[in-house]
Image: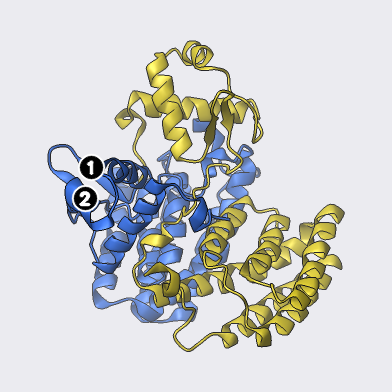
Chain colours: A blue, B yellow
């Protein structure tokens, strides 16, 4: 459980106050924060405490310091490079199995939500992500990063920010290798993505759910018996 | 996407090497790391780089420094206090709706996995978490922290480490207020928890799935129309 208020150090309390400031003022990513002096006055703490608080928030990917320019709200939205601590899970085949279980659990419904809530703008962007891989197939450079961009945009279309953050963490891990997708799997992938896209475009939640589930099952069939060779890069 | 290897600074590379060391040596939480001098020799980098790498890993909750004693593997397993960046989501009723959607999506199947994989030891611990609240009902101190402990232990029993980490992040957020549960909801909660526990104990995956789904729906019925007052503490 997280530390209760009374156990917090001064810099931690100041960091929480800065988060509240960002939220109540609706500061978007890229917004410049008041300078150290102003923050110290606004929060009624020393400049040293402000500096320590900013360091904490930089380490949490909530703020970023651009040298000579000031302190800004980070576009990482507080999401770390490995927010779920996946790099600490030792058993790599098990990690991959667990990641696939979570994808099977969340992504079909994610696609169903996307069919329900996607705006015309969302659908336009999804179409680009469907047609792009077709070119990549001919260039032989289709890889997991392109695949991840398609799936992540569907999480975005779902309208559920928590699901989007969870899937960002999962795909950050899965794309660390940037491994090429086997040729035999590429055509299936393109057919599957197109089917998912079409269901989302016609706002067919059940169709999107089923198309995503089928896609994940096809993906799983392509894998070796003991799962994905995640360990290749790591050890 | 995460930074590719070539973009990494020396301390980041050293940090990755330390993570590999922890993983290949199977260092458990609480294990003491070799000292700065030894690490610098093992990783073939300067002691200054080792110090910077350790700072990075402390900020990621992978290591902890105990003054005068050395550097240890943290029992937080690399999971931050707010790993999914939930404190940065401004729209609080929407955040709560999104969290409930994710719980509805993941927890019934989590309970089904638990029924399939829970060991006798797991079931023993779950029983304690079911009987404990009964005492708390009489003491009038049953709160969201007790509730969270029950749900988190089920995630643990599921055998899926990724699901466990996701649920830890979600419950860290939900228990920040440590709000008491309304009396009207308490008896329902105890009945629901008991039913979930019994299904898991008899390894009845379908029963556990349904009991968890019913429990989450009961919980949702207790909430005000616009969701949980998460904003109370935050603004």
Q: In this orientation, which residue lies closer to the viewer: A166 or B125?
A: B125
**B232 to B127, vertically: above or below:** below
> Label 1 neighbourhood size at 10 Å, few (<14), some (14-19), many (20+)?
some
**Residue at (44, 47) in percent of width and height:** A9
Q: In this orientation, which residue lies closer to the viewer: A41 or B30?
A: A41
Decide which of tag 2 and tag 1 comes sooner along the chain.
1
Q: Image quadrant of residue A115?
A: bottom left
Q: Image quadrant of residue A113?
A: bottom left
Q: Which mark is residue A72?
A: 2
Q: Which type of secondary structure does the marked residue at label 2 adopt?
A: strand
**Residue at (65, 33) in percent of width and height:** B30
Mark 1, residue position: A65
Side of A92 relative to B137 (left or right)? left
**Residue at (40, 40) in percent of width and height:** A178
Q: Position of residue B25 (x, y in %)?
A: 64, 25
Camera sees residue B167: yes
Q: Position of residue B214 (x, y in %)?
A: 68, 82
Q: Which type of secondary structure does the marked residue at label 1 adopt?
A: strand
The answer to whether marks 2 and 1 mark residues whose Cβ atoms lie closer than 8 Å is yes
């Amino acid at each position: 459980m997280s530390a209760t208020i009374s156990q917090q150090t001064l810099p931690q309390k100041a960091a929480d106050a800065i988060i509240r400031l960002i939220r109540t003022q609706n500061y978007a990513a890229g917004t410049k924060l008041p300078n150290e002096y102003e923050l110290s006055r606004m929060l009624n703490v020393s400049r040293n405490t402000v500096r320590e608080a900013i360091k904490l928030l930089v380490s949490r990917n909530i703020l970023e310091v651009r040298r000579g320019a000031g302190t800004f709200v980070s576009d990482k939205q507080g999401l770390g490079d490995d927010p779920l601590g996946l790099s600490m899970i030792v058993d790599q085949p098990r990690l991959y199995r667990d990641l696939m279980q979570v994808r099977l659990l969340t992504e079909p419904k994610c696609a169903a939500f996307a069919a329900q809530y996607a705006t015309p703008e969302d659908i336009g962007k999804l179409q680009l992500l469907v047609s792009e891989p077709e070119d990549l197939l001919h260039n032989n450079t289709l890889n997991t990063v392109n695949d991840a961009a398609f799936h992540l945009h569907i999480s975005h279309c779902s309208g559920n920010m928590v699901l989007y953050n969870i899937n960002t963490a999962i795909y950050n891990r899965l794309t660390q290798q940037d491994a090429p997708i086997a040729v035999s799997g590429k055509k299936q992938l393109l057919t599957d993505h197109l089917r998912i896209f079409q269901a989302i475009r016609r706002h067919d939640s059940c169709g999107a759910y089923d198309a995503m589930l089928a896609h994940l099952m096809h993906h799983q069939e392509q894998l070796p018996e003991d799962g994905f060779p995640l360990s290749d890069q790591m050890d």
